[in-house]
């Protein structure tokens, strides 16, 4: 799973119990979280991870949101974990971005845009984004050379097919990932890659023989249950807006919506799982 954002999605006891029950129903032995657990690793993510780990074997790599409170040394310590899962190994790494999804803008312009509008302006990484990504790609290439058809989990986006197409959002593609990841996966004949970051569920898509699995949970305003509820109650959305924040704000405090959310939460979680039989 990826992009649980348990702080913004206000995970409490009900959400955690529902997630655990859903994992149990699906007979999950091992849960890997491919980043963006919360904005506050020590205060919010760790207590959650410890509670989950009492019930299920659990690993995770970091997303950009998780990096907010973590220093570089610890970010690196969490990177490139090799996790044995039955007959296969899970290689879990964070990834990063090099602006290659927005080549028409100069690196300076992309950086300026990032420092004005993007969450990651709050992070303090030691290298430029292209240099960071280059170094991660070199390490990825080395690690994959030593592994026999591993499963791969990462946070960032490994192929331009999974970038945003709306003109308004296109500039943000610069900070989603890098096409280089795909080229390295191809070189090493990788069969399965799970990723998140862009809050859009692509399911499983095969590109050049690689199965890319992306089912991020994302923010509650983006969940199917929220979108479906507003769709089922057009009277609550008289202006017919498609703005997800506005739609969510129209219904979030209604007891009927809260009931619906409680009923549908397990389904939402199940749709956000990529399950492997190993
Ligand atoms: Mn992210």
Image (cartoon, rainbow, N blue to C red):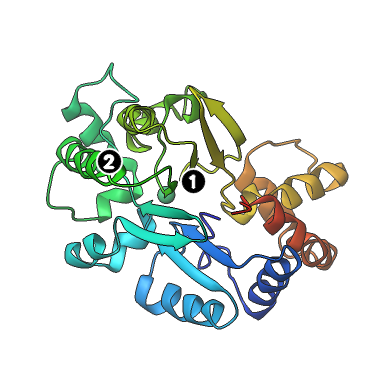
Q: Is residue 216 left or right of residue 43?
A: right
Secondary structure of the residue carrying tag 2 is helix
Q: Residue 188: horizontal and vertical position, in percent? A: 35, 33
Q: Quadrant of the N terminus?
A: bottom right
Nearer to the camera, 127 or 249: 127
Figure quadrant of residue 21? bottom right
Nearer to the camera, 181 or 67: 181
Binning the other alpha carbons within 10 Å of mark 1 as few (below 14), some (14 to 19) or many (20 upward) gives: many
Q: For the point 38% across and 52% down, which residue is it?
A: 91
Residue 145: image tag = 2
Vertical placement of residue 31 versus 111, above or below: below
Q: Residue 88: horizontal and vertical position, in percent? A: 48, 53
- Is the distance from the Cβ of mark 1 to the nearest ligand 1 atom less than 8 Å? yes
Residue 196: image tag = 1
Q: CA distance from mark 1 to mark 2?
A: 24 Å
Q: Residue 45: horizontal and vertical position, in percent? A: 44, 72
Secondary structure of the residue carrying tag 1 is loop
Q: Residue furthest top?
A: 104
């Amino acid at each position: 799973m990826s992009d649980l954002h348990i702080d913004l999605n206000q995970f409490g006891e009900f959400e955690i119990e529902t997630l655990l029950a859903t994992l149990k129903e699906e007979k999950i032995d091992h849960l890997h979280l491919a980043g963006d657990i919360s904005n506050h690793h020590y205060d919010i993510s760790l207590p959650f991870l410890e509670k989950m780990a009492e019930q299920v074997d659990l690993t995770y790599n970091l997303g950009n949101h998780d990096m907010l409170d973590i220093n570089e040394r610890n970010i690196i310590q969490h990177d490139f974990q090799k996790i044995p899962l039955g007959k296969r190994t899970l290689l879990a790494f964070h990834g990063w971005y090099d602006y290659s999804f927005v080549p028409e803008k100069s690196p300076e312009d992309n950086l300026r845009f990032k420092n004005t509008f993007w969450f990651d302006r709050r992070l303090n990484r030691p290298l430029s984004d292209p240099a960071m990504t280059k170094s991660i790609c070199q390490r990825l290439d080395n690690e994959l050379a030593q592994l026999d058809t591993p499963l791969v989990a990462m946070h960032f986006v490994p192929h331009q097919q999974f970038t945003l197409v709306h003109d308004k959002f296109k500039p943000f593609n610069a900070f989603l990932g890098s096409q280089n990841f795909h080229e390295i996966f191809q070189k090493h004949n990788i069969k399965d890659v799970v990723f998140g970051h862009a809050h859009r569920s692509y399911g499983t898509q095969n590109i050049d023989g690689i199965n890319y699995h992306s089912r991020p949970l994302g923010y509650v305003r983006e969940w199917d249950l929220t979108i479906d509820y507003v769709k089922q109650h057009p009277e609550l959305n008289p202006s017919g807006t498609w703005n997800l924040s506005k739609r969510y704000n129209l219904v979030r405090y209604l007891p009927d919506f809260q009931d619906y959310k409680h009923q549908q939460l397990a389904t939402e979680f199940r749709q956000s799982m990529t399950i492997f039989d190993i």
